[in-house]
Amino acid sequence: MTHRLARALFTAILLVTCCHSLHAQRPPLRWGGDAEGGAPFVEADPADPSRVRGFDVEIAEMIARGVGREPRFIQVAWSSIEQSVERGDFEVGMSGLEDRAELRARHAVSIPYYEFHEVLAVRPADRGRFRRLSDLAGRRVATLGATMAYQMLLDEQRRSGLVPISYDDDVHPYSDLVAGRVDAVLLDNIIAERSLRRAGGFVIQPEPAATGHYVAVFARANAALRDSADAVLRARMRDGSLERTFRRWGVWSDAEGDFFRRTLATAPVRDVAAQAPIERASPTSGRALRTYLPALVRAAGITLVLSCLAMALAVSIGILVAAGRVYGPPVLRALLTVYVEVMRGTPVLLQLFVIYYGLSGVVRLPAFAAAVLGLGLNYAAYESEIYRAALEAIPRAQLEAGRTLGLSEGQILRLVRGPQALRLALAPMTNDFVALLKDSSLVSVITVVELTKQTAIYATNVGSWVVPGILCSLVYLAFSLPLSRFARALERRWSWG
C-alpha cells in the first residue's frame, strides 16, 4: 500500500511539473504596431526607448495574458501592419487600426474596442464657413493615406470636387493647415486633439463627419486566436479594465460607455473611479537625447551593416552581369539587359514590397535578409552598367595585342582588361555606395528599424524634428563624407589626364 501511494504521489508531481513546464514554454504573443504613430496609441517610452507604451500596448498585454502568453512587441510601419500579420511576422496587429469592410474581407478582425469620430480641423478664421466636407468643394483637405478618412475624401471628391491630400504621418497635415498649405484636415478625434494640444493654431469642428472603431487584426487562418481575443476584450469591458486604460490615457468619454454597452448587449459596464491621465509631456532635449542615444547607435549600426552587405551583393552580381553582357551569347545578353532595365526602371521601394510581401507565398525571407536582397539586386543593375562601360572603355588595340601574344580571353580579362577597368570603376562604385547608404532608409517599410525610422520614432516622441534630424544627418554625413572624399581622391589620382 505504501509503495502504491508513493507511486501515485510521484505520478501526480510529475504531471504537475510537466503541465507547468508546457505552460512556461508557450511562445510569446507577438503583436505588431508602429511606435512612430505616438501616444496615446503606441509610443516609445521616454524613460526607456526600448519599451513602448500607450492604450494599444496595454490592450495587447490584456489579450496576451488572457490567452496565457507573454506579449512581445514588433515594430512595423503602420501601412504594413495588415500585410505583415498575414505574412506571419506577428500574430496580432494593433496601432489605431480602423474597422473597414475591406479589412474584414482580407483578415480575421476582432470586435471593436474603441469608438472614435472623424473630425474636421480648420483654421480659426474658417470656423464659420468650413463646417462640413460639403463646404470644402475645390479646397485641399489633408489626411492619412489608406484610412477611412481618405476614402471619405475620395468619395467627396467625386461629389463636389474636393481635393484630397494624402500624408504618410499625422503631424505634417496639421502643420500644413496652420501654414496655409491645405484648407482642412480630416482625421480621428484622438489624433486631432493630440495635435491641438501639441501645436495649436487650428480649431476642431464639433460636428463629427463620421464614426469609426479601432480593432485588432489577425491573419485569416488565425480565427481561433481572434475568437479568444474577442472573449478577453469582452471580459475586460465588463470588469472595467478597458475603461481604466482609456481614462489613464485621457481618451474616455460617456459615449465610450454607451459603445461598450451596445457591444456587450448585457449589463452596463460598472462605474470605475476616474484616474488621472498619464503624463505625456515631452522630455527635455538633454534627457531625451541621453535616453534615445543607445537606440540611435543600434539603428546606425544596422544601417551600416545592411549597406555593406547589400553593396557586397551588388558588386558580386554586378560583375557577373557585366561579364555576361560583354562575353555572353546573344540570348544571355538579352536576358541580362532585361534584368538591368527592369531593376533600374522600377522604384526600389516597389521591389522591396515585392520581395518581402509578394514572394511570401513562395519564400518567407526575414526582413533583414529581404532588405539586403532588395537593395543588392537593385544596385547590382547600376553596378553592372559601370563595370560594362569600364570594360568596353579599354582600347581594342590592347586586347588585340594580348591575343597576338597568345593570351586566352580569360587571361586578357585577368591581366589586361580587368585591372584597368577596376581603375575606371572604383570611383563611381564609391559614389553608388553613398547612394545606397541613403536608400537604406526605405527598408523601414518591411519592419527593419534602421537609422531614419528610429529617428522618426524619436522625433514623434519629443514632438520636434530639429534635434533628431540634426543627429540623423550627422550620422549619415559621418558615414558618407569619408567615402565621398575617397572617391574624389581616386578620381584625381587615376584620371587619364
Image: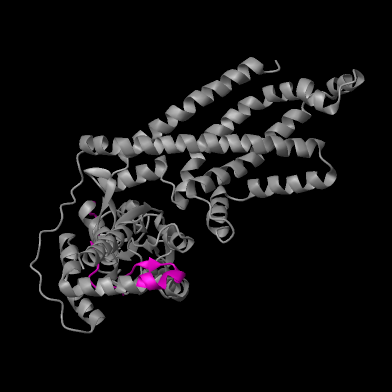
**Left or right: 450, with 205 as reference point:** right
- Count of labels shown? 0
- Residue 55 lies, with reference to residue 394, above or below; the image says below
- The quadrant the C terminus occupies is top right
Q: Front-most of 220 and 154?
A: 220
What residue is shown at x 73% (from left), y 21% (from top)? 420
- As drawn, the residue found furthest toward the left would be 273
- Describe the colour scheme in one phrase: one colour
What residue is shown at x 19% (from left), y 39% (from top)? 284
Q: Front-most of 369 and 7?
A: 7
Give coordinates of residue 374: x percent, y percent.
57, 46
- As drawn, the residue found furthest toward the front would be 1
- Residue 74 lies, with reference to residue 146, above or below; the image says above
Q: Which residues are magenta?
A: 199-226
Give coordinates of residue 199: x percent, y percent.
24, 51
Residue 463 visible (yes or no): no
Residue 206 part of the magenta-drawn span: yes
Give coordinates of residue 217: x percent, y percent.
38, 67
Q: Quadrant of residue 93?
A: bottom left
Residue 489 visible (yes or no): yes
Give coordinates of residue 451: x percent, y percent.
40, 40
- The quadrant the N terminus occupies is bottom left
Residue 461 part of the magenta-drawn span: no
What residue is shown at x 45% (from left), y 71% (from top)? 220
Q: Front-most of 51 and 362?
A: 362
**Left or right: 111, with 315 as reference point:** left
**Left or right: 478, with 1 as reference point:** right
